Amino acid sequence: MRKLNKARGEVALEINGHHLIICAQIDCLEQVEQARADRTFGQMMNDMNMLSISTLKECLFALTIEGDGEGAWASQVGALSLVKIQQAITAALFPDLPGGKDEAEVESP
């Protein structure tokens, strides 16, 4: 996997051997909002904080810019990776917050 562009808000995420890079590009966020039945950004953040599986899935697929997001999602067994996915998405959305770009790499157990 290539080096992350942390200034752009790219975040590395590893799920069961699938190495992904996610980035919160505005057009991708709009795509997620439309796919989630026009739920607002704030509502989607709340859904992610509540570990809404469908919201996390849509965000992961839309924000993955490198790697196989769908393959990574399908490789999960149980809910162990959901928190890691939520943390990586949050780090991509808010790279300047604690846990953001300076601590961006997130790996699954």
Image (cartoon, helix red, strand yellow):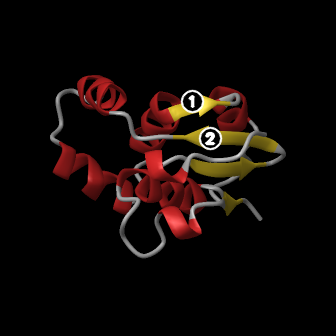
Quarter of the rendering containing residue 41: top left
Is 92 on the left-hand or right-hand side of 102?
Answer: left
Q: Earlier in the sequence, mark 1 or mark 2?
A: 2
Q: Which mark is residue 37?
A: none
When asked about the image quadrant of residue 104, the answer is: bottom right
16 or 64, nearer to the observer? 64
Classify 10 Å Cα crowding around label 1: few (below 14), some (14-19), many (20 and above).
Answer: some
Q: Farthest residue to the bottom: give it.
A: 98
Q: Position of residue 10 (x, y in %)?
A: 53, 46
Q: Position of residue 33 (x, y in %)?
A: 25, 31
- The one nearer the camera, 52 or 86, is 86
User: For mark 2, what is the residue?
Assistant: 21
Q: Quadrant of the C terminus?
A: bottom right
Asked whether 55 or 102 is in front, the reply is: 102
Instruction: Report the Cα–Cα distance between label 1 and label 2.
Output: 6 Å
Looking at the image, is 62 positioned above or below residue 92? Answer: above
Q: How many marks?
A: 2
Secondary structure under tag 2 reads: strand
Considering only vertical position in the picture, is 70 above or below 91? above
- Counting from the top left corner in percent of width and height, residue 87 is at 50, 62
Q: Quadrant of the N terminus?
A: top right
Secondary structure found at label 1: strand
Mark 1 near mark 2, Cβ–Cβ under 8 Å? yes
Q: Amino acid at mark 1?
A: Ile
The residue under the point 70% across, 30% down is 67
Mark identifier at residue 65 = 1
Left or right of 94: which side holds 66? right
Q: Amino acid at mark 2?
A: Ile
